[in-house]
Each structure stands twice: as C-alpha cells, then as structure tokens.
Image: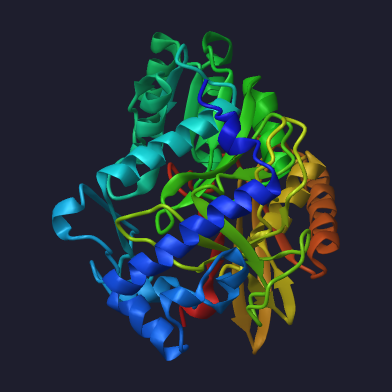
C-alpha cells in the first residue's frame, strides 16, 4: 500500500514545520541558481535570510504563466542541463509553450505522488491500469504511467486516438482501472454501450483529470459504468497529475502538501483568503529540483479546508473547482462559468452531457447560445415535446447563471467528441 501514514496523517503543526524547513531551503536554492527569482527578490528588498518559515511566505513574489513564457525555454531551470532527464511542455496554443524540466529525483517524487493518488482510489499492485491520457509533451500520459508502475500495477499504455481499439483492449486485458479525462471517459462509455459491451468489462475505478468536471458528471460516469470515479489534479508547471486527488468520501482533493504548499488568494487583490472562502489556488513547489516555482498562480478557483477527513488523512483539501479565473465569461455584466451550465444540465437529467456554449456580440449586445445534445426520439414527430424541453432547459440554465440564453437542442453525435480536454466554449467576441 502506497498510503504513507507518516506523511498523510501529520498534525497541522508537524506539517507546517516540515513545510517551513523545505521552504527555507527552496528560497535559498532559487535565489542563488535562478536569476529571475534573484532579481525579483532583490527588487522587493528580500534576501534568503528573510524567510524563516511559512509565516514569511506572503513576503515572496508571485510567479505566473507569462513568467515561464518570458523565460522560454530553460530560463527558470535551477540545475545544470546535464541533470535534467526529461522535459514536458504545454501546447502553446495561446502563446509560447511553457516548458518544465525534471531531474531524476523529480521523476521519482512525481511517480510517488501519482501512486499515492491511485492508492486513494483503492488501487493496488494487483490492478491493471489503462492509461488513456495523451503521451508526449503533455504530462498526463507519462505521469499516470510512471505512477501506476511505482504502485506496482500492470500498465496498459493505450494513450488516445483509437477508441474502438481502446475498448477492445479494455475487455481483452481485463483492465480494472482507467486514467483519462472525464469527457473522454463518457465517450468510452458511449462506445461500449453502442457495441453492447458494458457488461464485458472489469473496470472498478476511474481516475479522471486534466479538465474541470462537476459532481453531477462524476455520478453519471459511475452510473453508466458501474464504477467509482475519482478526481485527480495537477498541472505541468507544478509537476503534472498527482498534486492532489480525492478519496472515497469525495469531500475535496487531498493536496500532497509535503511537496506542494497551497494558498488561496483573492485573484484581484492577491491577498490571502480565509479557510473555506473561494479564491485562486497558488502553489509553491517545496521539493522540486528542475524548475522550482514560488507562489505560482494556477488561475484555478477553489477553496481549502484543513480539518481531518473521514478517511483519516490530515492533508489540506481543496474543493472541486468552480472554474478558472481566466476562463470566466463576462456576458452582459454577469460572470458565467461553463461548469455552472454543465451542473444544471446534469441535474435536470433530460439531456446528454454534451454541450457547447457560443458567445457572440450582435449590435453591441452580448449573446449566449447553448447547444445541447438530446435523445433522437425528440426529433421524430415530437415537435411539441422538443419545444417544451427547450423551454425547460432554457429556464434551468437561466436559473443557474442569472442570464437569459438561447437554447438549441441538437441530435446525438452532433457535438464533436474530444479525446483530450473537452472544448465547451466558442467565444466569437475574441475572433473579431
């Protein structure tokens, strides 16, 4: 069993003492090895000796994704190139890619963290884990792969790209767990159902991440596949998958805070927020060697709690993400998150989970159209029923987001399926 009680059941005082010692070493290391941080600290009048524990964390500067892009590709590395054994990078679709590097020790810690997450999901060395995240520069595939191997489980490195082959291998190999995005898992379930193979699989658990998803989607996945679904969180800048994961009680994601020090700050003022308040998640990497980051702004919106979980762990827990501060849509002065629409639709239970939000601007007025797939029966001489469902859906969404919307119900398979991160928003205002 990977669950290390000494790490995951520390008292709050013990954890903070450990974090403080590691933070002091981290600050000294980046000050002397990373010019970017040395200049940042000098501009604030800081020296390593000014940081004596986590009580001094607020003195340190923030780091953003743009800082990584400005120092592309290796400007934030804290060790010689000869010690970097692997690099990963973001896609760079909205600018330069963000590049991260790992030492051999970084890979070992990363693998251990993912294995701890899989252990929280009830997996052991006796399981067969199918990894259906993309392999390559994206951290998902190799991160889950190394974690499953560290756990001692059998790994099926399926990746994405051929769902029919994936489901065949799932049946033939007797996979008991799968790691992939939640939206892709719904597509896998849809494929299994269409082929009449749902009763031919041996899955008992899914570890899903890499995109925001709602509690309603988790319940739908569990119902469709008769499994338990768990939420794993990470980002390449901090490490990759395995920064946090929920347990069987689903009361928040346990942060492996012996390696990753979390904060919640107001995204506008950057001031610390109280336990339980929703704000932007910020991380400091306490043990990372290749590219250690101080107070990295994730843009993910969540809250944090420090009370002991029913599972026995005392690790800090972050709530399911509300969205991202940079993904929030402002439509006619109203803040809208795609997760609000998804939760409303899944709670209704009368549509599929496949939807697309199209934002446009007509005569200087913002408009929102939501396209949603519904069962084919609504399009066969059921005009009145289709119109009634459209009205019910529009009302439900309006109640959820406080904004009137145009709803367009479309036939099954109309909205494109994604094998990676699902695309739920097209903002045409940004295209003109």
In percent of the image, x 66 and y 54: which residue is there?
Answer: 321
Q: Residue at x 23, y 60 (%)?
A: 79
User: Does 43 appear above or below 284?
Assistant: below
* 115 displayed left or right of 349: left
Work out whether residue 183 or residue 245 is closer to the camera in this orientation and state it. 245
Find residue 369 and report its image quarter. Answer: bottom right
**Spot occupied by residue 81 in the image (x, y as percentages of width and height):** 16, 58
Look at the picture and state if 17 lies above or below 179: below
Occupied quadrant, residue 248: top right
Toward which corner of the image does residue 98 lie, by quadrant? bottom left
The reply, left or right, for residue 91 in relation to residue 87 is right
Q: Residue 232 versus residue 354: which sits nearer the camera?
A: 232
Residue 107 coordinates in the image, percent (x, y) = 32, 42
Q: How is the image coloured?
A: rainbow
How many circles with numbers are drawn on the protein?
Answer: 0
Let me know if residue 43 appears in the view: yes
* Residue 110 in picture, x, y percent from top left: 40, 42
Q: Is residue 213 visible?
A: no
Residue at position x 46%, y 36% from top? 114
Which residue occupies the foreground of this view, 215 or 166? 215
Q: Is residue 222 above or below residue 138?
A: above
Residue 232 position, x and y percent, is: 55, 41
Q: Is residue 69 left or right of residue 329?
A: left
* Figure check: 350 above or below 396: above
In terms of depth relative to the viewer, which is nearer, 149 or 95? 149
């Amino acid at each position: 069993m990977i669950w290390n009680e000494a790490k995951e059941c520390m008292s709050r005082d013990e954890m903070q003492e450990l974090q403080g010692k590691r933070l002091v070493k981290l600050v000294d290391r980046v000050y002397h090895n990373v010019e970017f941080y040395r200049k940042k600290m000098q501009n604030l009048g800081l020296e390593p000796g000014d940081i004596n524990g986590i009580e001094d964390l607020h003195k340190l500067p923030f780091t953003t994704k743009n800082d990584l892009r400005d120092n592309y590709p290796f400007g934030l590395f804290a060790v010689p190139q000869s010690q970097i054994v692997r690099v990963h990078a973001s896609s760079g679709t909205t600018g330069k890619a963000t590049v991260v590097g790992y030492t051999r020790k970084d890979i070992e810690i990363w693998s251990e963290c993912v294995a701890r997450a899989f252990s929280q999901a009830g997996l052991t060395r006796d399981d067969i884990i199918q990894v259906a995240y993309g392999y390559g520069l994206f951290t998902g595939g190799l991160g889950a792969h190394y974690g499953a191997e560290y756990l001692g489980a059998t790994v099926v490195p399926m990746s994405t790209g051929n769902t029919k082959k994936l489901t065949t291998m799932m049946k033939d190999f007797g996979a008991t767990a799968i790691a992939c995005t939640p939206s892709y898992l719904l597509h896998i379930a849809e494929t299994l159902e269409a082929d009449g193979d749902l009763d031919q699989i041996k899955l008992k658990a899914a570890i899903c991440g890499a995109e925001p998803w709602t509690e309603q989607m988790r319940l739908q996945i569990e119902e469709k596949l008769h499994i338990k679904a768990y939420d794993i969180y990470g980002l390449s800048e901090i490490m990759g998958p395995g920064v946090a994961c929920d347990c069987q009680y689903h009361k928040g994601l346990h942060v492996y805070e012996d390696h990753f020090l979390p904060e919640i700050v107001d995204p506008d003022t950057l001031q610390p927020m109280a336990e339980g308040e929703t704000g932007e998640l910020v991380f400091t990497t306490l043990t990372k060697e290749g590219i250690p980051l101080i107070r990295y702004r994730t843009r993910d919106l969540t809250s944090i709690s420090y009370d002991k979980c029913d599972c026995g762990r005392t690790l800090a827990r972050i709530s399911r993400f509300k969205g991202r501060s940079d993904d929030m849509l402002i439509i006619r002065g109203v803040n809208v998150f795609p997760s609000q629409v998804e939760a409303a639709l899944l709670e209704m239970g009368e549509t599929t989970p496949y939807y697309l939000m199209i934002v446009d601007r007509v005569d200087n007025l913002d408009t929102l159209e939501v396209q949603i797939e519904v069962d084919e029966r609504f399009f066969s001489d059921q005009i009145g029923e289709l119109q009634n469902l459209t009205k019910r859906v529009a009302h439900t969404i309006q109640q959820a987001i406080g904004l009137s919307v145009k709803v367009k119900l479309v036939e099954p398979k109309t909205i494109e399926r994604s094998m990676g991160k699902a695309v739920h928003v097209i903002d045409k205002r940004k295209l003109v």
